[in-house]
Image (cartoon, grey):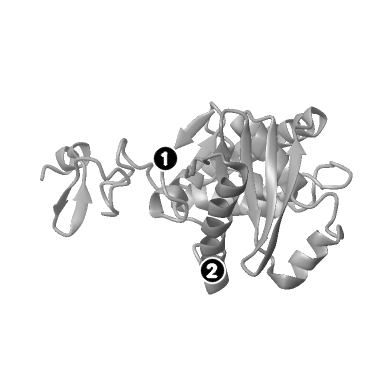
Amino acid sequence: MIVYECEQGTEEWLQLRLGIPTASRFDKILTAKKLEFSKQSAGLMDELITEWLTKEPFDTGKSQFMERGNELESEALAEYELEKGTPVRRVGFVTTDDGRVGCSPDALVGCEGGVEVKSMGMKGQVAAALGRNSVNEYTLQIQGCMWICEAQWWDRIYYHPTQPSIIEKVWRDQDIIDRIEEAVATFNEKMDMAREELLQKGWTPKPDPCPPCKATIDDGRWCMSRNRTEKINGIHMCETHRRLLNV
């Protein structure tokens, strides 16, 4: 497990997710009910290959509803800490050791737990309170997070600012995790073959960014590392990047 301490939604976070399957989209690889390889996997693969080629997120749109959701998430986590008497750790992104699969947990709790916040509006909150939410709801995402984060449990929080929160503890299900891991490995193998096919046909991915700042020599994007950076010609550059550009 590799943990990246960055803020979710930032450029650094977007770059970390590029071209790899993430837990929030495991339902595009595996069906939630029968745990079978999903027909939607081809579309997801096309999006991830596009990111690999362009080195840009396939969809960077952020609606006002998403922004409001981020605000509610912070409120929900603060309430959760008070209720449980346990501090949570907010992280940006977590990957498997090989860096080929990732997730963005809303928070980690201790060494064995995590939190997923869902703000679905009043109707969704009513459904959750009355037990009408689907048994399979977010199962692949949460079990996927537990796999990647090496956790034993995850608290799913249904949150609305004017009504009581609903907290459901989800325990690690190794059978489901094994199916997820197998399906994601198959997905990545197919994606590797698809990328190789494009290379053989003359497709050329945009050059990989130079470490450690993730900025490329030709496109002038900002360095991802803000440590010891210096603003030159309007661009934040780390020492490595400045040396490569001879500035």
Placement of the C terminus among the 4 image quadrants:
top left
Residue 88 vs residue 64, the one in the foreground? 88
Place residue 154 in its image quadrant. top right
Residue 209, percent from left and from top: 35, 42
Asked whether, in this view, residue 36 is left or right of residue 42, the answer is right
The single residue placed furthest to the right in the displayed view is 34
Q: Nearer the viewer, residue 79 or 30?
A: 79
- Residue 187 in view, yes or no: no
Q: Position of residue 243 (x, y in %)?
A: 15, 38
The residue lying toward the viewer, choosing from 110 and 222, is 110
Q: Which mark is residue 68?
A: 2
Q: Is residue 68 above or below residue 95?
A: below
Q: Total number of numbered labels? A: 2
Which quadrant: the N terminus?
A: top right
Instruction: Judge the density around disc 2: few (<14), some (14-19), many (≥20) Cα neighbours within 10 Å.
Output: few
Q: Residue at x 59, y 37 (%)?
A: 101
Disc 1 residue type (three-letter):
Glu
Label ID, residue 5? 1
Q: Nearer the viewer, residue 8 or 124?
A: 124
Where residue 95 sits in the image (x, y, percent)?
54, 35
Contact between marks 1 and 2 (CB within 8 A): the answer is no
- The local crowd at label 1, few if under 14, some if 14 to 19, many if 20 or more residues have their Cα within 10 Å, is some
Q: Secondary structure at mark 1?
A: loop
Quote the CA–CA distance across marks 1 and 2: 22 Å
The location of residue 47, given as percent across then percent down, is 59, 54
Q: Quadrant of residue 105?
A: top right
Horizontal arrangement in the rendering, residue 117 relative to residue 247 (left or right): right
Q: Residue flagged by tag 2: what amino acid is it?
A: Arg
